[in-house]
Amino acid sequence: MTNRYDIHTIDDVAQFFGGQRGMQERFALSQPAVSHWKRRGIPTGYHMRIALEVQRAGLTINPELFELDEPLAGLLNSWRASDNGAAA
């Protein structure tokens, strides 16, 4: 079975943004806030921004990180496919 997503975990999100320090700087977060994300999940106010930045990089993100239901999950990662098709 192959993985469908490039980014699977909050640790992967942190790595995408340059580690915990990168996340702190990008989102003006304290170190405890980043640790809180790892325990409790990504706050909804950050979902769209993270998803768009990941998509702009040409990557996909596991929608379970955002606790999305199936229809929204499909939409999230379809942006990448539609952008790649539009560029052709």
Image (cartoon, rainbow, N blue to C red):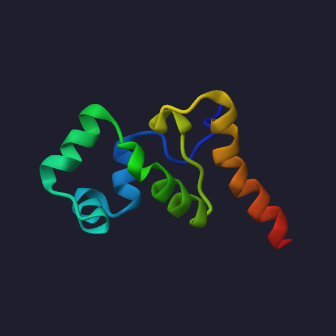
Q: Is residue 58 left or right of residue 14?
A: right
Looking at the image, which is closer to me, 75 or 12? 75
Q: Is residue 8 left or right of residue 58?
A: left
Q: Residue at x 51, y 32 (%)?
A: 64
Q: Quadrant of the N terminus?
A: top right
Q: Outermost residue, bottom direction? A: 87
Q: Is residue 25 above or below residue 30?
A: below
What is the x, y in percent for residue 26?
Answer: 31, 67
Please say whether residue 1 is visible from this viewpoint. Answer: no
Q: Residue at x 19, y 43 (%)?
A: 35
What is the x, y in percent for residue 36?
Answer: 21, 40
Q: Is residue 72 above or below residue 22?
A: above
Q: Quadrant of the C terminus?
A: bottom right
The image quadrant of residue 62 is top right
The image quadrant of residue 80 is bottom right
What is the x, y in percent for residue 59?
Answer: 59, 56
Q: Residue at x 60, y 28 (%)?
A: 69
Q: How many marks?
A: 0
Q: Outermost residue, front direction? A: 45
Please say whether residue 19 is visible from this viewpoint. Answer: yes
Q: Outermost residue, right direction? A: 88
